[in-house]
Image: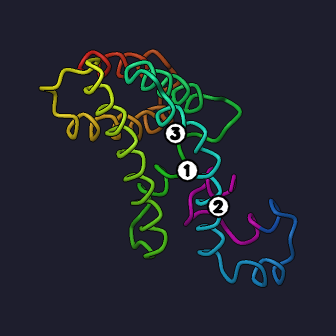
Amino acid sequence: MLVFWEKGYEAASIPDLLKAMGLSRSSLYETFTDKETLYLEALQHYKQIRQQKRNLLIQATSAKAGIRQYFEQHIAFAFDKDSPKGCLITNAAIGLDSPDEPIRQLIQNSFEELERAFYELLHKGQQTGEIDPKKDIKVLSHLLLNLNHGIPVVAKVNTDTKIAYDMMNAVMEML
């Protein structure tokens, strides 16, 4: 997973993958069939690891607090010096020049699941009176999804977390 995360799909060579995984070429192909299948497995594994962060939205008792907590964790992860830059799913979406259908579908599903989690939490916030019922929560969920994918892109080129926190705070004020 780390080789794809650090280099991207196209730049990750078979020798790089073999070295990182400690496998022989025959074992790699026997287990995963091809590089594309290994990449899909890596994306699915990453998505499972990141589910903990998405659970902050699902389990939140307050819409605004849940969204803030999610993005605080997201910013900390995006700017973590011990992790590869960016988000593997975001990087994969940016690198989709000629997408393989299963990879494109996994990325699309990931986007839709996160947007739905934002939407459902905003809807809960409207029901409890925390979010103004006149707010278009569909648009706000799109905005939050884009903030989610924008933060790791910014983190790849700028190490100042203040920018990400300022973006988060500006969007939080819109809620």
Q: How is the image coloured?
A: rainbow
Residue shown at the point (32%, 19%) measured from the top left: 172
**Residue 7, position as x, y percentages in the image:** 61, 55
Instruction: State the separation of the CA atoms marked 1 and 3.
Output: 15 Å
Overall secondary structure of the magenta section: helix
**Which type of secondary structure does the marked residue at label 2 adopt?**
helix
Residue 74 lies within the magenta run: no
**Residue 122, position as x, y percentages in the image:** 31, 31
**Dot 2 corresponds to which residue?**
42
Instruction: State the separation of the CA atoms marked 1 and 2.
Output: 9 Å
**Dot 1 corresponds to which residue?**
88
Left or right, 149 with respect to 22, comes to: left
Decide: few, some or many residues near mark 2? Use Cα within 10 Å; few <14, some 14-19, many ≥20: some
Left or right, 5 with respect to 175, comes to: right
Query: Where 168 falls versus 8 (above or below)?
Result: above
**Dot 3 corresponds to which residue?**
54
Mark closest to the chain's N terminus, 3 or 2: 2
Residue shown at the point (48%, 57%) measured from the top left: 92
Mark closest to the chain's N terminus, 1 or 2: 2
Looking at the rendering, the stretch of residues picked out in magenta corresponds to 1-17
Looking at the picture, which amino acid does disc 3 mark? Arg
Query: Where 67 falls versus 40 (above or below)?
Result: above
Mark closest to the chain's N terminus, 1 or 3: 3
